[in-house]
Image: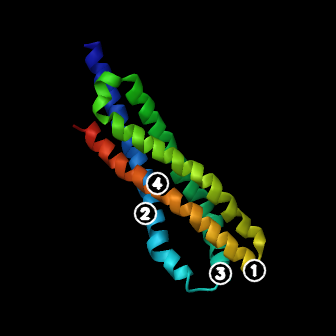
Amino acid sequence: MESTGGSINSIILLRILLIAACILSGLLTGSDTERYIVQLPAWHHLDVRIWGEFSRHADLENGLFLYPFEAIGNFAFLPGSSILVFVNKEKLQRAAIPVYASAVLSIIGLILTFFAAPVMLSVRGIGNDIITLQHAFNKFYYWSFFRGIAQVLSFCICVWAIGKAFQ
């Protein structure tokens, strides 16, 4: 009996962790997708100083709290799910591949953030120098592109993991 209760508890905990991770990574994926499909093409038609001013008010004010919360929260839940699956191999084996893959992609997304974030943070002190702002814009979107791919894939695979956890 104890083994069955432990099995049920580990499955319920895995489902909770994955749902939380999916919610946060879904928010992040939505932000990434909107940024690349809607915002980036528009920024290419505007003066880069407008992007700098916008970023100072968006990314470096409310975004300074929201984006890290989404990325770090997602990161916390997925490795936690991976550990749970690893410890309970027999009971949770069906979810192992998507849980591990989603966690790895989440970690990659977070690592790539360490390349993009300092660029965005530098925008605060750049001023309105067009050349420096253009360099920051290009570098930020370069790293954000790869980060976004990792985060979007992590979300998609996290949805797959939830499906496996509910089988």
Q: Return the residue nearer the eye: 42 or 23.
A: 42
Disc on the earlier residue, 1 or 2 = 2
Disc on the earlier residue, 4 or 2 = 2
Q: Where's residue 22, x and y in %?
A: 39, 49
Q: Where's residue 157, x and y in %?
A: 36, 48
Task: Place residue 66 in its image quadrant.
Answer: bottom right
Q: Secondary structure at mark 4?
A: helix
Q: Secondary structure at mark 3?
A: helix
Residue marked by disc 4:
151
Residue marked by disc 1:
128
Residue marked by disc 3:
48
Task: Place residue 84 in its image quadrant.
Answer: top left
Residue drawn at (62%, 76%) of the image: 54
Q: State the CA–CA distance, disc 1 to disc 4.
A: 31 Å
Q: Quadrant of the C terminus?
A: top left
Q: Secondary structure at mark 2?
A: helix
Question: For the residue marked with disc 1, what is the amino acid?
Answer: Asn
Q: State left or right for residue 63 relative to residue 56.
A: left
Disc on the earlier residue, 1 or 4 = 1
Question: For the residue marked with disc 4, what is the amino acid?
Answer: Gln
Mark 3 and mark 4 residues within 8 Å of each other at the beta carbon = no
Q: Return the residue nearer the eye: 63 or 120.
A: 120
Q: Where's residue 57, x and y in %?
A: 64, 72
Q: State the CA–CA distance, disc 3 to disc 2.
A: 24 Å
Disc on the earlier residue, 3 or 4 = 3
Count neighbours of disc 3 (C-alpha within 10 A) and say few if under 14, some if 14 to 19, many if 20 or more: many
Between disc 4 and disc 2, the foreground one is: 4
Q: State left or right for residue 166 relative to residue 68.
A: left
Q: State the CA–CA distance, disc 3 to disc 1.
A: 9 Å
Residue marked by disc 2:
30
Question: For the residue marked with disc 3, what is the amino acid?
Answer: Val
